Image (spheres, rainbow, N blue to C red):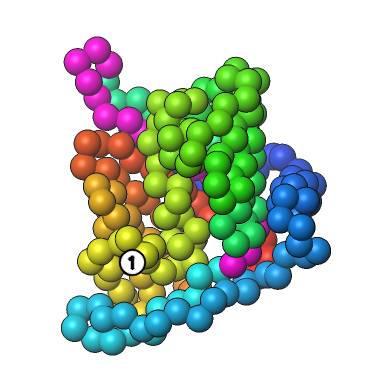
Amino acid sequence: MSVLQTIPFQANKLGLLTALTAAILVTTGCQSLKANSGTNQPSSTVQGQSVQQPQKLESFNITGKIGVTTPANDANGAQGGSAFYAWGQQSDRFAIELIGALGIGKTNIEYNGQSATLVSEKTGTLTAADPETLLKKATGWQAPISQMPYWISGRPAPSDSAPQLDAQNRLISSVNGEWNASFTYKGNDKLPNKISAVQSQGNKVVMTIDHQNR
């Protein structure tokens, strides 16, 4: 079942991103978000060669569509859902708004670096120590949310293994625990415009990415 097809995003993205950015700034006490700023990262060895890793983006605003598929079980076949999203990130803090959110309606997720909060029309307010636990608690879906800021930056997460690069030294696949991630790029772009992550049990996440502050 294909859960992700690129179609026009009908929500007001500019207003949404402004609201997300404002929420992050209030939380962090920062005065502004610096587009595409990053921290210097050491080189790593990939396929026997020492390669300088891309910088992790310390802040970004992205929009797109996310699709999730869960594996079949004895009671049900494979199930899926999708949502449009807007994601604002500042350091390790983020705010995400989901529209058409995976069966629970419009949803807001915030993470302050220590705990995560989810608010939706169906679930009310939920909290958890990390965003993965929170998402599973609210929807039953599984997704490698904590690794996404690194993958969105086109670099492996610190806990990744077996990263593979293309001829332009861009990350094209990486492994994080039970998740196998693959990356697609538009033309010569250095940042991925699509991430697909598949878990050994059959969970799958596909995410299209439109960087708003490039």
Residue 129 location in percent, x, y? 49, 39
Residue linked to disc 1: 172
Q: Residue at 32% across / 61% down in the picture? A: 159
Q: Is residue 93 above or below residue 142?
A: below
Q: Is residue 92 above or below residue 109?
A: below
Q: Is residue 4 above or below residue 127?
A: below
Residue extent of the magenta highlight? 58-76
Q: Main secondary structure of the magenta part?
A: strand
Residue type highlighted by circle 1:
Ile
- Residue 164 visible, this angle: yes
Residue 98 location in percent, x, y? 60, 37
Depth check: give the residue in front, 1 or 104.
104
Residue 50 falls left or right of residue 211? left
How many C-alpha atoms fall within 10 Å of the one at disc 1: few (<14), some, or many (≥20)?
many
Classify the position of the C terminus by image quarter: bottom right
In reply to whether residue 172 is colored magenta, the answer given is no
